[in-house]
Amino acid sequence: MNDNLYPDSLLKLIKTISRLPGIGKRTAERLALSLHSWSDDELKFFGEQLISLKENVKSCSTCGNFSDEEECKICLDLNRDTTIICVVENAGQIAVIEKSGSFNGVYHVLAGRLSPMNGVGPDKLNLASFKSRCLEATEVILATSPDFEGEATASFLTQELNGVQINISRIAQGIPVGADLSFADSASMAMAINSRRTL
Ligand SMILES: [Zn+2]
């Protein structure tokens, strides 16, 4: 994009928007111009939501899912089967699995995955309550990504559960290798969960 086309303040907004996943420079340009046509009140409301995003949306103290309260809606839901725990890398993946309608257990969000190359070791993951939660469960589904780091994380978790009486399974085919699970489609995710294999 020609940087002389717009004033600096608009260029800054376009650059910020283009950092969002799936948004190229042209789309960012279109979105920024569209925002400029919003009323002052609408922009103020939008801005307030952004400013309070981190403050309002916290992590569930039990599973690490997004939550406005101490515990998320899933952990508070008495109809969920707490004996099956699905381990995901980030909270965004929960929405994909929920939309697939293939799972009625509870979750455990790692908030990352092992990546020795980037200095991410087990100490950086949300593992404090992992083992104790698994001691109360009968099955844990490892839904980490189907790529090198995701597989390494799944292996590590399997070792961590050595000696714990629990069925450990891994999500199966349906998810393309290297796929970002936060954006997988629900049908693929449903297939991956339903045809999980025991480790
Ligand atoms: Zn929760």
Image: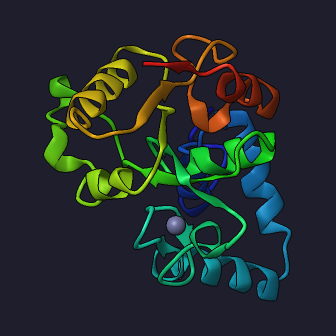
Q: Position of residue 112 (x, y in %)?
A: 35, 43
Q: In this rendering, is residue 4 above or below 71?
A: above
Residue closer to the observer: 150 or 193: 193
Q: Write down the quadrant of residue 22 in the picture.
A: top right
Which image quarter is the N terminus in?
top right
Q: Position of 93 compared to 160: left or right?
A: right
Residue 142 visible in the picture? yes
Q: Nearer the viewer, residue 178 or 80?
A: 80
The residue located at (55%, 11%) in the rendering is: 177
- In the foreground, 2 or 113: 113
Residue depicted at 58% across the width and 49% down the height: 92
Residue 111 relative to residue 6: left or right:
left
Residue 13 in picture, x, y percent from top left:
59, 57
Between 74 and 165, the one lying in front of the other is: 165
Exactly how many numbered labels are in the figure?
A: 0
Residue most extreme to the bottom:
41
Q: Is residue 42 left or right of residue 11?
A: right
Give above or below for 149 relative to 108. above
Identify the image's colour scheme: rainbow, by chain, secondary structure or one colour: rainbow
What residue sits 17% from the left and 23% below the top?
A: 117
On the image, the x and y values in percent for residue 66 come to 54, 66
x and y, in percent, of residue 43 in the image: 74, 79
Q: Quadrant of the C terminus?
A: top left
Q: Is residue 126 visible?
A: no
Residue for point 64% across, 18% down: 175
